[in-house]
Amino acid sequence: MKKLIFLIVIALVLSA
């Protein structure tokens, strides 16, 4: 499930 959190973090950084 850590990969899911990692993907969410990346999405937030890209949208920032």
Image: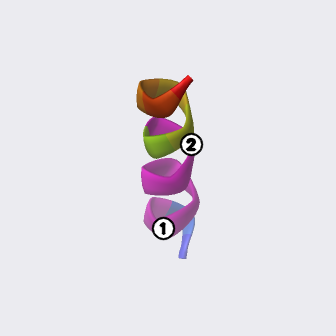
Say how many tags the image has: 2
Rendered image quadrant of residue 3: bottom left
The CA span between labels 2 and 1 is 9 Å
**Nearer-N-terminus badge (2/1):** 1
* Residue drawn at the location 56% of the way across and 42% of the way down: 9
Crowd rating for badge 2 (residues with CA inside 10 Å; few <14, some 14–19, many 20+): few
- Compared across the picture, whether 16 is left or right of 15 comes to right
* Depicted 7 relative to depicted 11: above or below: below
Q: Say which amino acid is labelled 1.
A: Leu
* Depicted 5 relative to depicted 4: above or below: above
* Depicted 7 relative to depicted 12: above or below: below
Judged from the image, the secondary structure of the residue bearing numbered disc 1 is: helix
Judged from the image, the secondary structure of the residue bearing numbered disc 2 is: helix
Q: Where is residue 7 drawn, in percent x and y?
A: 42, 53
Rendered image quadrant of residue 14: top left
**Which residue is at the front of the view, 9 or 15?**
15
**Which residue is at the front of the view, 13 or 3?**
13
* Depicted 5 relative to depicted 12: above or below: below
Split into 4 quadrants, where in the image is the N terminus?
Answer: bottom right
* Residue drawn at the location 56% of the way across and 38% of the way down: 12
Range of the magenta residues?
3-10
Say the numbered circle drawn on residue 14.
Answer: none
The secondary structure that dominates the magenta segment is helix
Query: Can you identify the residue that label 1 sits on?
Result: 4
Crowd rating for badge 1 (residues with CA inside 10 Å; few <14, some 14–19, many 20+): few
Would you say residue 7 sits in the magenta stretch?
yes
Q: Where is residue 13 drawn, in percent x and y?
A: 52, 27
* Residue drawn at the location 48% of the way across and 67% of the way down: 4
Say the numbered circle drawn on residue 9.
Answer: 2
Q: Say which amino acid is labelled 2.
A: Val
